[in-house]
Amino acid sequence: MSMQRPIRTAGELAEAGLVAAGDVVALEAVAARYAVAITPELVELIDPADPRDPIAAQFVPQLAELHTTPEERADPIGDLAHSPVEGIVHRYPDRVLLKAVHVCPVYCRFCFRREMVGPQGLGTLSPEALERALDYIRAHPAIWEVILTGGDPLVLSPRRLRAITERLAEIAHVRVVRFHTRVPVVEPGRVDEALVAALKASGKTTYLAVHANHPREFTPAAREAIGRLADSGIVLISQSVLLKGVNADVETLGALMRCFVENRIKPYYLHHPDLAPGTGHFRVSIEEGQALVAALRGTLSGLCQPTYILDIPGGHGKADIGAASIATRGDGCFAVRDFRGQEHRYPPVG
């Protein structure tokens, strides 16, 4: 079924053949709690006949989302604890998040901000709130990098994006502007000449983190959109989430990392799933994640290696949780583990 606009309701999911008609009423309860949006480009990627389709798993709501566990949190990475003014998260000394918008072109079923985004979420910053957020950045000279996230900042029009980047260009101590987005893969048509130009702040270096979780997301249209960004001189990095049923195997994860590199995107972060409400069916164990990352090291080019990251619940920041490959031995030497799991002796200095 060819769609002309995003799917946003359980009824529309059934009309598109993505869920059974008999599940509509139950899924309406999921959609009422957590926003739903699936772009036409993603609908075309989903195989309705495959109950394990990895694209559907990311975007089509499931009844499992209504099941929560005691360790899950509405704000699993503690954004609110580090928000001195509306729209700003200042967790680390040299960088801030600027959340100008809390809507997205699609809504991931594992989103760690799912309680904040969507039509029922925190909305878009008013002009007054945006000015207060910029005032905060101006008043803190240690801020070297501003990361626009949300929500997805690329849902803003080129005019509104340009207004933000022009204001950031005026702040001398800000040297890097970074965007986090799914738009190039889920709505690649938005990435036109005007939008690409709007992302660049004069005198600053622009980075853009492309969020993708499965190699099938790299459609010809997505590759063209990514190419327009890369050709403009914007530095591209990746972010992905390790998800059961989507990419939690060596073959899929390796293919994803190669897709990034082939499209001039440097693998950056592979996130362990956060403790967001109703997302337990996506989570793998840390040990499983460590084994997968170790296997990548043994099979793929060094260009394809992401950093396996856990956002410590409660707002305590990120930790690299890739399996440690070196440990001290009783004789003063080190035991170094290779990608096959075998240990080797390495001597101390002197």
Image (cartoon, grey):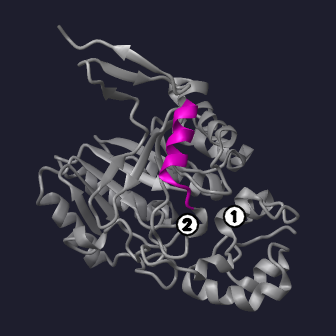
Discs 1, 2 touching: Cβ within 8 Å? no
In the rendered structure, the answer to whether residue 270 lies left or right of residue 49 reads: left
What type is the residue that disc 1 sits on? Answer: Ala
In the rendered structure, the answer to whether residue 321 lies left or right of residue 1 reads: left
Q: Nearer the viewer, residue 117 or 274?
A: 274
Residue 20 lies, in percent from the top left, at 84, 80
Image position of 350 with respect to 337: above or below: above
Residue 295 covered by magenta stretch: yes
Residue 142 lies, in percent from the top left, at 13, 49
> Which residue is tagged 2?
110
Image quadrant in which the C terminus is located: top left
Work out whether residue 266 can be spotted. Answer: yes
Residue 97 covered by magenta stretch: no
Label 2 crowd bin: few (<14), some (14–19), many (20+), radius 10 Å: many
- Name the residue at 52% across, 38% down: 293
Give me the C-alpha separation between circle 1 and circle 2: 10 Å
Q: Secondary structure at mark 1?
A: helix
Q: Which mark is residue 57?
A: 1
From which residue to which does the magenta span run?
283-296
Q: Nearer the viewer, residue 87 or 32?
A: 32
* Residue with the most extreme bottom position: 25
- Name the residue at 41% across, 48% down: 309
Residue 1 lies, in percent from the top left, at 87, 69
